[in-house]
């Protein structure tokens, strides 16, 4: 169902993809938006390797929510900071592209658990996470992407 990677020699192993999903903090999340136009937004996220799921949060209504309710097929892209080889100017960056199905999580306990794990990835202290959850968890919409296909690619920008 999914196309094979055209530049297969640049493919990276699944383990490296999972490492990048775990370590990186930002991604581009794409849905099929209004009138069939793509709609992509930057997001912060949490990858749960055991569940093979990506979690993120947002508002309970808006373009993203409407798009997911209309069509749950999504694309998620993240990348690492890359590196330069000695004596070279160009960057070598590894990207990970995920295709999957997104859904809105309605379970409050699951929302709180995953929102906590998500926040711990970004906030400097657990105390700040708990304070934020105490004040805002009831306004949070949690989203999950069930990963159906994932590829990783090492790109030399020259």
Image (cartoon, rainbow, N blue to C red):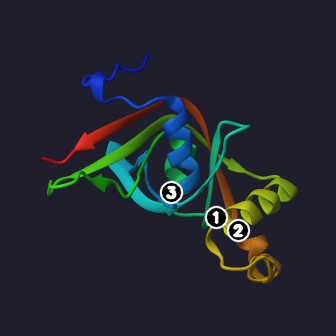
Q: Nearer the viewer, mark 1 or mark 3?
A: 3
Q: Are marks 1 and 3 in contact (CB under 8 Å)?
A: no
Say which of 57 and 96 sits in front: 96
Q: What is the CA distance from the residue labelled 1 to the residue labelled 3?
A: 25 Å
Number of numbered markers:
3
Neighbor class of circle 1 (other Cα within 10 Å; few <14, some 14-19, many 20+) is: some
Horizontal and vertical percent for residue 122?
61, 71
Neighbor class of circle 2 (other Cα within 10 Å; few <14, some 14-19, many 20+) is: some
Q: Are marks 2 and 3 in contact (CB under 8 Å)?
A: no
Sequence-wise, the earlier of marks 1 and 3 is 3
Horizontal and vertical percent for residue 155?
26, 41
Say which of 18 and 114 sits in front: 18
For mark 2, what is the residue?
120
Residue drawn at (81%, 78%), measured in percent from left and top?
Answer: 130
For mark 1, what is the residue?
60
154 shown above or below 11: below
For mark 3, what is the residue?
24
Horizontal and vertical percent for residue 121?
65, 65
Sequence-wise, the earlier of marks 2 and 1 is 1
Sequence-wise, the earlier of marks 2 and 3 is 3
């Amino acid at each position: 169902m999914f196309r094979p990677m055209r530049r297969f020699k640049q493919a990276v192993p699944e383990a490296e993809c999972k490492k990048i999903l775990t370590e990186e903090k930002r991604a581009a999340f794409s849905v099929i938006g209004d009138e069939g136009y793509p709609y992509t937004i930057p997001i912060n996220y949490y990858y749960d390797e055991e569940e093979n799921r990506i979690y993120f949060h947002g508002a309970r209504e808006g373009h993203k929510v409407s798009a997911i309710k209309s069509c749950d097929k999504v694309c998620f892209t993240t990348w690492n900071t890359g590196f330069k080889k000695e004596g070279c100017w160009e960057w070598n960056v590894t990207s990970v592209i995920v295709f999957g199905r997104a859904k809105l999580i309605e379970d409050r306990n699951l929302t709180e658990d995953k929102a906590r794990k998500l926040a711990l990835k970004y906030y400097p202290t657990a105390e700040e996470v708990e304070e934020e959850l105490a004040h805002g968890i009831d306004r949070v919409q949690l989203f999950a992407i069930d990963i159906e296909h994932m590829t990783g690619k090492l790109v030399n920008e020259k």
